[in-house]
Amino acid sequence: MSRKLELKYNEQGLIPAVVQDDVSGEVLMMAWMNEEAVRKTLETGRATFYSRSRRKLWVKGERSGHVQEVRSVRVDCDGDTLLLRVEQKGGACHKGYRSCFFTEFDADGNPRVVAEKLFDPDDVYGKSG
């Protein structure tokens, strides 16, 4: 028996998507999706998101080549957050790291970088990217 699940988008027509490495479980990034981005992701198997600043769809890796091949798309129990499990090619973070979560706070609230850069963002995106 098949039924269509209704996703709960916010007032802007967006739903948050947490992106996780399918093998290691590492959380790579969080981005926003609209209905079209969800549909394209499911159709193509490539992670597609909605840019709030540019007001358009973007495919992860379209500029950098660091694509995300989607292995599964899950939805939480409330229907208002997605989990994309992906095979990440290269870095997920536009600042050059594998994960966007490369900064950790110590007990005193001081931040420190806990990962190594995989690439130089200036080389991939240019100085203004």
Image: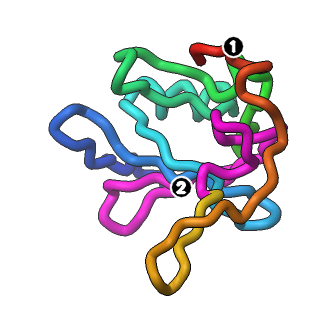
Residue at position x 64%, y 29% from top? 60
Q: Residue 114's image quarter?
A: bottom right
Pick whichever, 125 or 87, lies toward us.
Answer: 125
Residue at position x 72%, y 21% from top? 122
* First along the sequence among labels 2 and 1: 2
Residue at position x 46%, y 83% from top? 108
Pick whichever, 75 or 3, lies toward us.
Answer: 75
Horizontal relation, residue 125 to residue 106: left or right: right
Q: Is residue 6 above or below residue 1?
A: above
The residue indicated by pointer 1 is: 126
Q: CA distance from mark 2 to mark 1?
A: 30 Å
Amino acid type for the residue under numbered disc 2: Leu
Tell me the element at label 2.
strand
Horizontal relation, residue 23 to residue 62: left or right: right
Residue 6 image offset from top left, x and y in percent: 31, 47
For label 1, count other residues whose C-alpha is less than 10 Å away and answer few (under 14), some (14-19) or many (20+).
few
Residue 31 in the magenta stretch? The answer is: no
Tell me the element at label 1.
loop
The residue indicated by pointer 2 is: 83
Which quarter of the image is occupied by the C terminus? Answer: top right
Q: Is residue 64 above or below residue 87?
A: above
Specify the principal SS of the magenta part: loop
Residue 27 image offset from top left, x and y in percent: 63, 60
Q: Is residue 81 above or below residue 9?
A: below
Stretch of the chain drawn in magenta: 72-101
Q: Nearer the viewer, mark 2 or mark 1?
A: 1
Identify the residue at the far bottom of this view.
107
Residue 12 image offset from top left, x and y in percent: 21, 32
